[in-house]
Each structure stands twice: as structure tokens, then as C-alpha cells.
Image (spheres, rainbow, N blue to C red):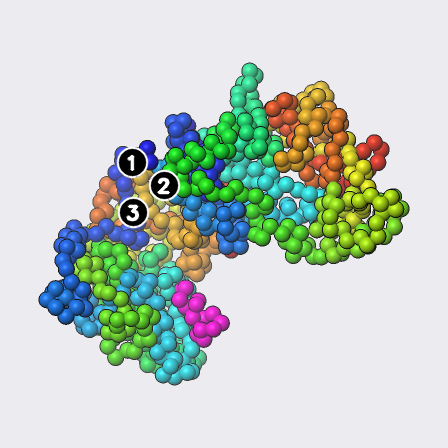
Amino acid sequence: MNDSLPTPRTSQQTVYLDHAASTPMYDEAVSVMTEQMTRLGNPSSLHASGRSARRVVEESRERIAQALNARPGEVVFTSGGTEADNLALKGLFWSRRSDDARRTRILSTAVEHHAVLDPLHWLGSSDHGAEVELIPVDEFGRVRIDALGESIERDPGSVALVSVMWANNEVGTVQPIHAVVEMAHAYGIPVHTDAVQAVGQVPVDFAASGVDAMTLTAHKVGGPYGVGALVVRRELELTPLLHGGGQERDIRSGTIDTPAIAGFATAVELSVKHRCEHAARVAGLRDDLIRRVLEVVPDAVVNGDPVSDIEHRLPGNAHLKFPGCEGDSLLMLLDARGIECSTGSACSAGVPQASHVLLAMGCDDESARSSLRFSLGHTSTQGDVDALVEAMAPVVERARAAGIATGFGASSKRAG
Amino acid sequence: MRVLAAMSGGVDSAVAAARAVEFGHDVTGIHLALSRNPKSYRTGARGCCTIEDSNDARRAADVIGIPFYVWDMSDRFHEDVVEDFIAEYAEGRTPNPCLRCNEKIKFAAVLDRAMALGFDAVATGHYAQLVTGDDGLIQMHRAVDMGKDQSYVLGVLTQEQLAHSMFPLGDSRKGDVRIEADRRGLSVANKPDSHDICFISDGDTAGWLRDKLGAGEGDIVDHSTGEVLGSHEGAFGFTIGQRKGLKIGRPAPDGKPRYVLDIEPVSGTVTVGPREELTIDRITGIKPRWCGSVPTEPLHGTVQLRAHGEEHEAVVTVTREGLEIELLDPAQGIAPGQAAVVYDGSRVVGSATITKAVRRAVTIAADG
């Protein structure tokens, strides 16, 4: 009995509304990657097999660079978004501070992903010498440019770098990245942006944006897990995190993963190529989803920017608050119906946490815990939206009863 | 039935969940996060509140093939169990936090939420048996494995709670449960049993209480003469009936060992005296909880006064405030705050919190 996997409880089709967590791989990326997996050769080897693998890697680099309007030499492959963020933040901080010891300040926002916030927290802790300032955001999660300006102008010479995400992973708010760059560059301060959620959803032009370093990852654009890149200007010096063979421009060591990089390039290329029609299609589904969920649950509230064009909000993002319901009750009830979404992040023990993004936007703890993220992607269909809308009213009714039963909302005290 | 299986990460709750599936129920596994900071509670395999335990529970759910979630009950646990534990000690009583957790968390907050979410019952790995009586009421009986019997810590459950509870291990022996876990491919088969209090990470209850309540220095006095025999650095280090560690320089006049008879929380006075003064045969209990119908006449049954303690033959009378227990075979070292669980044969009748335990006409412990 131990040898066979348990049969799934339900036979119904999964309604996957969690593309911001990970989106299915494109068939083309799977086949490119599968083909490369059977090939021989370490890209760093000097013989024919090595050269052949190296060619695949460099062609992939060129395709990614072209899709994002960067130069191939600016693409540094990493193990994913988290490593790219760490490399950018620590690498830039160390390098900039070693050039000038006064540069100890790092300016970022309170709504960044943990892959940015946690390295910053670490850099800001006792031994590591950084002073991290998290610039506040408005009620839609958009960084307050005036506050950023004030912070820089207080002492521009002490700012090592600015890091502001291109688009928020939870509420989908698109940041005014050009304004951030303009402000920082006026004082010669480099800017990093985590564009993990933005690529393939909104126009991302590395050169035109002016950002100095940009994080992306494959599995959010239809590529494989475990590979990503930091796109970083050649003239920028980064102190490496990983020391070894020096494979990637001497700032990132580790054997180059040819198959993953080939799949990554295919996914970036496809997602950027089809971005316009994709964005229009999923934005249409998303708008339908929000409109109809609000019809069946009239007291639900949309979190994030009410203006939903791609200047303001990721096309596939719907983030809603369901008053009186605990997000994890909703998630569990929807999951039991084969509908998959997200409440935000959970700690390593799996305990759901109130979203730091919503809290930074001024939500109280209870509202933050009452919220769900639905994120649509390239495989989403009208049927997915219909299934969610059909399930939503009874699920909210149950979750609300459970919230009342456990006194949710009766107390403002919550876990820290 | 739709069953919510509470999975601690231990072997018992894993097998209980697996059995619930085998009974044909639609089972969902949950792990209760009880600590506000999972790293702050007990580490290693002994406790029930660590990341490892959460992962063990998740892996067991995978193997059993059921959905699994973590429920954050840390606030409720802190308010209803941890703070209650501290407050009880501050009043000089000796509470049982496992009993309180069953009463307030597992079979209250969790059960309420489960019912509201559409579940019919909560299953746990407790060793106790539920049977339906002729009167249609659910009865709770001691487990088959008397060494593991946990009916004492479940003695606070009411009929309403029992009607929505499942204890799939009540008819089994612990050794067989481990063998079954191994056969089912559950990696927790050989995980050590949890002991002690899960929220006191190093097992040092006295030290933990000293942190929370301050030192509480005081005198050690003789019960008959009132003479101060010495002093101590904290009343929380003592339990009624304790003999060792009193650090009184002089022996008693009669040369016999002295025991802690009473702890006075406000002054920190610890009263000591001879062993026979620990013996009690009259108990007053408050806040009674009845598993089924309330006994209308004095009940000749047994009572258990501590977890894994022995049974005492007793006559139990329901009063307006709670209950009066007359022990036919006396007990020793009973502290206010402990629970008295009343049995009729193997059946749990109910329970109450001990406020007074006396012998003859001598009051051992004052009203709390």
C-alpha cells in the first residue's frame, strides 16, 4: 500500500489562479529544455561539446537581452530571483561602500518581496553596516516619490543604492520606476529593481528604464524553476556572493545550467513577444473576475490601485478583501473545490502571516488577514473565472461563519 | 463524514488521521501553530510546537494522502493556556495546561472553526474511547492501553464536544500504533513521545515561571510551630508534596523528612511538615464540566487527581458551587488548581478544578 501514491480526492479540473506564485511552463520551453538535457558538455569546457553547450548559453543570453532591450553582456545568470536580488543588494552595497565609506544608506520600500527585504534586514543588522530606510507607500502600494526625494536629499552622498520593485507581487501595483531612476540618478545613485512580476506583463525596457540592475526569474514567465538573471550594467561593479569558477563575469560562480537557461530564454522571448495580446486578454478576464465577484459578494473590497491599466496594475492581478473572513479559511474552502489562490506569504512552519504589503498600505491587521490574491496567467480561461464566481458566495458565507465562531474581528490582537 | 484531523507531527495523531481515512471519512489534516514564534518553543523531537513538528505533520499528511494546512492558534493559545498557566501559578495553584488546551483550543476554538467550515468532527491521537450509550449519549471511557490512557486530560469535554470528537486510537496499544505507523510508511513511527509542557522550551518550569512572575522569595515555615526554618528564592520552585531541595539546615525534631504542605503565593511562604499532613480525603472542586448527564445522587465511583495518577475510590456529591469528593482511600500531595476527574468504572463522568483538599478537619490548602 505504500508503493502507490494516494488517489486525488477530486476528479474536477484544477482552477489555477496563482500564476504570480508560478506560471505553467510553455510547451516550447519544455521541449527546448528537454532536448538540452540529453546534450553533453559543460559550457566552460574547451572541447567541441563544451563549445556547443556554450553556444546555447550565449544564444540564450542574447535572446533574453534582446527581449528586454539590454546588452548580452549585461545578463548574469543566477539560480533565480532570490539570488539575483541578494547579488544586486549585497554586491552593490559592498562595492559602493568600498569605493566610499560614507555610502552606508540603502533606500527601498516597505512593499518589497522578502527576497529584497530580508537581505536588507540582514545588511542593516549590527555587523553589516547598512542603514536601511524603507520609503513609505500610498494606500495603493505605490512608493511616495516625494518621500524618496526627501530621503535622498537629506544626505545624497551617503546613499549606496536605491531598490524599488517594478511591480508588486501581491497587489500588482506598478511602481513609477522612471521617476525613481530620475531622482536617484540626479545624485549618481544606482537603482536596482526587482522585475520578477513585471516581465511579460508590462513593457520592460532595461535600457530605456535607466535602471542599473534588474532581477528576473524564469518560472514567473513560463520557464523552469531554479534559474533567473540579474541584468546589470557593465560599468557597475558588484562584489560577488558566490566564489568559485567565476563563470558569470566573475561575479557569479557555479556551473552554468544549460538546459534551464535555454528554457528560460525561450520563455522570456515568448512572454515578451506575446505580452500585448496576453495582457489585454488576462486583464479582460481579471476585470470580469473582479466585477462578478463583487456582484456575488457585494461587501468585498478591491485592494491596490483602482485604476487597472498596465501603467498602474499588473494585468493578471486581482486582490480582494472579504470582510469577516479569514483568508486562510477562504483558501482552504476554495482549495477543497479545486480552486487555487493565495493569501500572501507563510512562515517556514506554514503559519499564514498578515501581508506586510497590505500593512504598509495602511490596512489594519484584520483586513490584511481577510484578503486573497487571484492571479491569472497565460493558461487562464473564462471557465476559470466562471468557476471562481460560482464558488465564491457559498465559500464566503462559510468562512464568515467560521470567522464569527472563532471571534475573528472581535479582537485586534494578533500574533506578531 | 468530513473530519478534521489535528496533526501534531507525532506518531499518534498521524495514525489517528490514517485510520479516519480508512473508516471512509473525508479527512483534512491541520497542524496547530501554537507559538507566536515557532522557534521559541521546544526544539527537537520532544515537544509539539516546532517547525520540525509542522513538517513531520505535513509529511504524514502526504503519505496518508490528505490535504494539509497550518492553523494559527497562537493568540488563543497564549491567552487561554499560557496566560492562564501563569495566572494560576501566581495564585498559588498548580494548573494542567494540557487539560486547558483541550478545553479551550483543540475541542473549542478548533472544533468551532471546523464545524463552521463544514466539518462534522475533529479527530485527534488521544488515547480514549467513545461509545454511544443506551440513552443515545456519547460516553468517554478509558483507553484500552492504561499506560497511555488520556481520558484524564479529556475530562473537561462536554457532551456537545464529545459528539463531534473522534479518538481512533482508544482501542489500541501504543506499541501497536508504532508498528502500524511503520507499516503505513509514516516516518514518525519511531519519533519519541512528547512530554512536559510544550511552551516551556527547556523543561525548566520553575525557571520559566521565575522569568514571568519574578523571584517570589519567601520563608520556609514549620506547619505546627510557625517557626521560620529557612528561606527560598522563589515559591515557583516548589510543588505540594515535594521533599527534596528544601535546603533546610536543621532536621525536624522528630527526625522525619519534611514535605511542602502549602504555598502562599502573595507572601511567598512555603509551609513544610511531616508526610502524614499531606494526606487528604476531602476535596472541593469548582467549575465542574460534565461529559453527559449530571449525577443527581452521590456517586460511588473513582477519581483521578493528576495525569497518570492512581485512581481513588470516592463518593462524589454535586453541590451548588461544584462538587464535594470524599475519598475512601486517601491521597497525598494534592494541590489546588489540579483537576479531579470523576469516573464511573471506566467511564468519565466529569471533572472539576480542585480548590480545597483537606484531611479530617485540618485545612491543607486555603481557598484560592
Q: Earlier in the sequence, mark 3 or mark 1?
A: 1
Whole-angstrom CA distance, mark 3 to mark 1, is 29 Å
| Quarter of image, res A103 | bottom left
Left or right, B261 with reference to A375? right
Tell me which residue sits at (33%, 36%) in the image.
Answer: A2
Q: Position of residue B337 (x, y in %)?
A: 69, 40
Q: Which residue is mark 1?
A: A4
Q: Is residue B366 above or below residue B284?
A: below
Q: Is residue B87 above or below residue A245?
A: above
Q: Position of residue B111 (x, y in %)?
A: 50, 35
Question: Badge 3, how many Cα within 10 Å: few under 14, some, many 20+?
Answer: many
Question: Which residues, given as a range, are shown in magenta?
Answer: A117-131
Chain hosting mark 3: A
Chain hosting mark 1: A
Q: Nearer the viewer, mark 3 or mark 1?
A: 1
What amino acid type should be assigned to the residue bearing mark 3?
Leu
Left or right, A106 with reference to B143? left
Whole-angstrom CA distance, mark 1 to mark 2, is 12 Å
Q: Is residue A166 visible?
A: no
Q: Which residue is mark 3?
A: A17
Q: Which residue is mark 2?
A: B62
Q: Position of residue A152 (x, y in %)?
A: 40, 77
Tell me which residue sits at (61%, 26%) in the image.
Answer: B348
Of residue A156 and residue A297, the one placed in the foreground of this image is A156
Q: Nearer the viewer, mark 1 or mark 2?
A: 1
Same chain for labels 3 and 1? Say yes or no.
Answer: yes
Disc 2 on helix, strand or loop?
A: helix
What amino acid type should be assigned to the residue bearing mark 2?
Asp
Left or right, B107 with reference to A124? right
Of residue A141 and residue B290, the one placed in the foreground of this image is B290
